[in-house]
Structure formats: C-alpha cells, structure tokens
Image (spheres, rainbow, N blue to C red):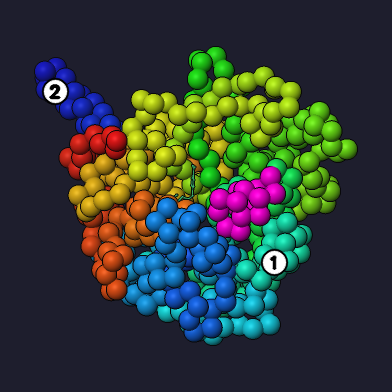
Amino acid sequence: MTSYSFLRAAFSVIFAVTYVFANDTLSFPQGFLLGTATSAYQIEGGWNINGKGESVWDRWTHDNPNLILDHSNGDVACDSYHKYKEDVQLLKDMEVDFYRFSVSWTRILPTGYPNVINQDGINYYKNLINELLANNIEPFITLYHWDHPEYLDKMGGWTNSLMVEWISNYARVVFKELGPKVKYFTTINEPADVCQGVATDKVAPGKNLGSPGKYLCMHNILKAHAKIYHIYQTEFRKQQKGQVGIVISCPGAFPKTPNDTAAVDAIFQFVCGWVAHPIFSKTGDYPEIIKAHIADNSKLDGYPASLLPTFSPKWVQYIKGSADFFGLNHYTSKLVETVPRVEGERWYDYSGVKQTIDPSWPKSAADWLRVVPDGLRQVINLISKQYDRPPIFVMENGFADECCTSDSSRISYLRSYMKAMLSAIYEDGCNVKSYTAWSLLDNFEWADGYKVRFGLVNVDFTNPNRTRTPKLSMNWYKTVIKTRRIDSIFESPDVVNIP
Ligand code: PNW
C-alpha cells in the first residue's frame, strides 16, 4: 500500500466513524421504546353508562362548569369508550411500541370497593388490550390518573389514610383481571398534581385545604403507591413478570441569577424530590431540605409540630425501592430565585424559591408551558445523579396549541425535546429507556376543557362522531418510529411563538 492510499483509507475510516457517531446521536438506542399516551377521564366519555360509577372529575365538572375554560366536561370526550378500535388503528398506523392509557377506577368498581365488579368495565379494558396486542402494541397501564370514586372522596379521599387500602384493593382487581396480558404498570400519575386538588379549589376534588391537606395527601399517596407495588411483588410478579413504576412530574429549573444554584437544587427537591426521594433515594423518606424548611416554618407560624407528617422507620423502608422504573412527565421549565422569608408570608410554599418564566422562552397555548428543551436534559441528569441512574421512562412530553392539523410548532417542540433527551443518553450517560408523546388525541384538558390541545390527532368535538384527523405531527412521529431517528430532514420550522 502506498502512503497516499494508506492515508486515504485512514481518512475514510475516521470520516465514517465520525459520521456514524455524529448521526447516531440522532438515533434511538437499540431496544428504546416509543409510544404515546392518554388518560381515561380525558378521552373515554361514557361517564355513566353500563354500570360505571361517579368519579370526582364527573362530579367536579358537573357542579363547577364555570371553573372549566369552555364550561365543558368529559361526559363524551373523545368517546373512546365506543371508538377504541379506531384509536388502536391510529396507533397501528404509527407503529408505536406501546400505548399508555389509564383505567377508570369507577368503570371497574362502581362503588369504589371490590364488592361489585362491573363486568362491562373489565370487558372494555380486556377488549382494548386484546386489540392492542393483536396489532403488536404493548399495553402500558396507569392505574390512577386523578379520577377516584366520588363516594370515597366524600369519606376524605386522599386525606383519609384508608385510601391506602381502598386503592390497593382496586389495584389488586386490575392486576388479577388485566395483568396476565400487561407487562407495564404505573401506579399514580403525578402525585403532586393530585394533591393540588386537595390544597386548592381549582381542580377536582377542590377541597381547598391548603398546605396541611397537601402534605397529608402526599403522605397517603406515597404509602398507597408502595402498598400497590408490594401487592404486585408478592402476589403477581412471579406469574406476570411485569414492571411497576410511578409517574412523577419534574419540570426544569434555571437560576435567575447565574450563581443561585441553591434555588435550582431546592426547587428540584420540593417539586420532584418530594415524591421521588422517599421511593428512589438510598436513604428514603422526604428530602432533608423539605423536612427542615417545613419544620422551621411551621414553628415560626405557630404550629405545635411540623405540618409535614412523619413516616415511621417501617414505612420509610417499605416505600424505599418500591419502583422498577422512574416514570417522568416533563413539559417545561421555570426560572428560579432564592428569596428571604418575609414575616407573615407563605414563603413560596415553604420552599424559599420564587418561580417565574423567562419571557424569551417560546410560548404555547397553555400559560404554564414554555418551550425549554434543555430542561428535559437537566432533569434527566438530576434524577440520574440523585437516585443512582434508575431506568427512566419518559411517560409524557408534549406541546399545547389551539388549532389545526398543520401543527409544525408541535413537531418542532417534540423534536427539540427528543434531541435533548438523546443528549442526556449519549453525552451524559443517563439510562433512559422510553419516550411517550402526550397525547394520542386532542382531549379534555382538565380546567382548560377542549380549548387547549395536545393531540397528534385532531378530534372534532362538535361532531357527534368525534371524527379523528391525523395532524402533521402524527405523520412526523410515524417517520421517527419507522426510522428510529430524528433526522434533521424531518425538522420543521422553529417553534412558532404563539401570541
Ligand atoms: C399532565 N406542569 O399534567 C397530565 O398528566 C395530563 O393529564 C395532562 O393532560 C398533561 O399534563 C397536559 O397538561 C401536567 O405545570 C400539568 O409542568 C402541569 C404540568 C405538568 C404536567
């Protein structure tokens, strides 16, 4: 070989390696799972038919239409109770690896208790699961996505520690009836958001109990989650061989002034660590900063003891390690700053951190959702560092608009967030196993009604048929799934800043 041809060969090898490496950072790793998600109350409809009982969201929307942006409710929603086969055809067309949906507690147990099992409800979910499996799609079940029985709520709901038993009995029925064909379960979707319904009167069940109620709610939720996990572990895992996790909302946080990293750390613990630390940390229990801040400030506010309930050492052990994966919901970020406590003021829920929005971050149709893809990379890194690289399943990520099927802003959002996630995998070595686009369909977006839309598929809510029309983003996601890459040739224009 001449020195010239050797050099040429060497260069082409270097070029190929560089090329492959550079492009690989836009490909999903081997075995990575791509899917999409919905939740029962947001899509099913059929709120009171064929034996279904009343949930807190049924009651809330019927009693308080004025608290829903367009005065709507989930009575019919996307009518997926009747149209699930059409939903599965959309999923099949996209060739998703899995579909995350939630089971409605009151469709299965109309009284809340397992004294009555509603066969129609069981059949609905069995049919959905069979339809998914027949189309090569893995069912991924959320046991509880905010719609617990109204009757149990009247007895205190998440402020009653018996809720731990009530939800465990419901979970046992789901594992028994649906578990044989399901490999992935999450217990509770976004506990901190569930507890907003206890603390405030803005979302169901609107108990308006403030911080004491909020802390009590989370205490019971953490126990409930652990109990469900242990039920699966002792009664079902051997035969069913599935995995059970929890879904936690962890927004990103960037310091308002460059040196204020304390604000970033504190807010991560107060929002994400509040749920995650008891389950995923080596020590278990609430994060130290939460225990200390709430104890100190409860005292300053004249309470005889900390408003934060205490776990016994037995409960700490029981909750610690009770998840096979970390389910992460992530949409957006906040600017954070440490602020001194002012006598007589709540001090930002005792966190001592003020959260604002950087006005330069591109907007969406939801006030709270600004486009900040680096936030996803940041939280994946924080979770990996804090909890020793647990397997992370991104369970929700998505963009809000108010219109149309030419949703290039959604494509741009999804691509930028997926790219940030791939950087966390390839450049930072984090252990992310799956990605879920929220949502398959435009659906009932809680207090925003049908005005704010997250779907890859448009739903015509004025049409009794609830006609589904794929958006550009669905076709884009389909290409991503087929090629297992987010190539720049599929890149859309930059996020259009929604005014
Ligand atoms: C999620 N945040 O809630 C819920 O799980 C879904 O049911 C909902 O449709 C979706 O997000 C879109 O709203 C969140 O402020 C609410 O960061 C708020 C936040 C995150 C998730």
483 in the magenta segment: no
| Residue 369 spot, x, y in % from top left | 41, 39
Q: Residues within 10 Å of mark 1 (few under 14, many from 20)?
A: few
Instruction: Tell me where the magenta segment starts and ends, as one range.
Output: 195-210
202 in the magenta segment: yes
Q: Is residue 80 visible?
A: no
Q: Is residue 255 left or right of residue 157?
A: left
Q: Observer-nearest residue: 203 or 91?
A: 203
According to the image, label 2 marks what residue? 8
Main SS, magenta region, reads loop
> Residue 84's quadrant in the figure?
bottom left
Of the residues shown, which amino acid type is indicated by label 2?
Arg
| Residue drawn at (54%, 25%) of the image | 336
Q: Residue furthest front?
A: 66
According to the image, label 1 marks what residue? 154
Q: Is 78 located above or below residue 23 in the figure?
A: below
Q: Is 233 located above or below residue 282 in the figure?
A: below
| Secondary structure state at the residue bearing disc 2 | helix
Q: Is 223 located above or below residue 334 in the figure?
A: below
> Residue 38's quadrant in the figure?
bottom left
